[in-house]
Amino acid sequence: MADAEAISRGGGARPGAFAIWFQAIRPWSLTAAVVPVLLGTAVAVRAGHFAAGRLVLALVGAMAIQAGTNLVNDYYDYLSGADTSESLGPSMVIQRGLLEPIQVWWGGITAFALGSVLGLILVYLCGWPILAIGLLSVAAGYFYTAAPVALGYAGLGELTVFLFMGPAIVVGAYYVMAFSFSWTALWASIPLGFLVAGILHTNNIRDIESDPVHGKRTLASALGRKGATMELIALDAAAYLTTLVAVLAREMPWTMLLVMLTLPRVRSQLGIVRRETEPKRLNLALFRSIQVHLEFGALSILAFLAAALFGL
């Protein structure tokens, strides 16, 4: 590949193996796995349940599955032609010749295997519900871009991300702590699910013109730019409205109103999406979406820990 040839000719220093794989797993995306695990744990702490060892297993396992999903998705997006040297989304380790495609695939399988081993330990400690959540999560991660399912290519990306990066992880993390399910954990997971779906949807708005060329049918490309913008507004609004309803219904503590502090970020995100059409400029909207999810999640965790501390 061109980049690899340039490196071999002395045109640039090749990064070390650790740096390459660190780039390949897209570590900035791992917050999408970390935040819901910590939120489910915070909900459990408020209910009087906590186990540090099981928390570490759940955290590392969730991050491993997310890393595996990133790697496998990069591999299949490269094969389909959806990701090229001009693309803005992938890690670029394949496109730059830093790793061979098959190395990226095997990296993904290794990460899934690590996540699965840790998951099986949790199954032994906590019971079969964790097995069901884990199996479905790994399958969703692998077949997000892999044939014959390719969920992300069939307009099912937002739904998949909502379910598995929202309710599945939050409720699963609560179960790991408490050995039971919780309606409060489910309520807490729904706003986070809407926001993580919003991250993907913003990504798809950025790629709204290039995705259909490579056979990638997303909701954004199906709805068109105006319709896709309206969907993003709906996802954001649903996150905050769900929170408000749950607080008023006393399903979540009033401290959850702290998340309203993130509304200026949402305003910035939507302003960029409504104003810009150039992919590189829309990258800032994607960054804002990630910020909204991270800050909303952090404030949610703080809200439940504060409620636990003060008996709310």
Image (cartoon, helix red, strand yellow):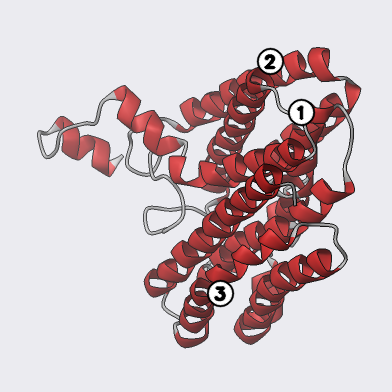
Which residue is painted at 46% across and 87% down in the image?
Answer: 275
Residues packed near mark 1 inside 10 Å, few (<14), some (14 to 19) or many (20 plus): many
Which residue is painted at 40% across and 29% down in the image?
Answer: 21
User: Compared with residue 255, is residue 128 higher up or lower down, i.e. above or below?
Assistant: above
Give the x, y percent position of residue 33: 61, 41
Of residue 275 and residue 101, the one placed in the foreground of this image is 275
Q: What element does badge 3 sit on?
A: helix
Which residue is painted at 70% across and 52% down in the image?
Answer: 161
Tell me, for residue 263, which label it has, or none.
Answer: 3
Q: Could you tell me if residue 148 is visible in this image?
A: no
User: Compared with residue 181, is residue 276 higher up or lower down, i.e. above or below?
Assistant: below
Tell me, for residue 115, which label it has, or none.
Answer: none
Does the CB distance between marks 2 and 3 fall below 8 Å? no
Give the x, y percent position of residue 93: 38, 39
Which residue is labeled 1 in the image?
Answer: 177
Label 2 vs label 3, nearer the camera: 3
Using the rendered view, name the quadrant where residue 278 is placed.
bottom left
Inter-mark Cα distance, 2 to 1: 18 Å
Give the x, y percent position of residue 298: 56, 51
Which residue is labeled 2 in the image?
Answer: 117
Of residue 282 and residue 213, the one placed in the foreground of this image is 282
Using the rendered view, name the quadrant where residue 47 is placed.
top right
Q: Earlier in the sequence, mark 3 or mark 1?
A: 1
Q: Earlier in the sequence, mark 2 or mark 1?
A: 2
Which residue is painted at 63% across and 39% down in the image?
Answer: 38
Residues packed near mark 3 inside 10 Å, few (<14), some (14 to 19) or many (20 plus): some
| Residue type, numbered disc 3 | Leu
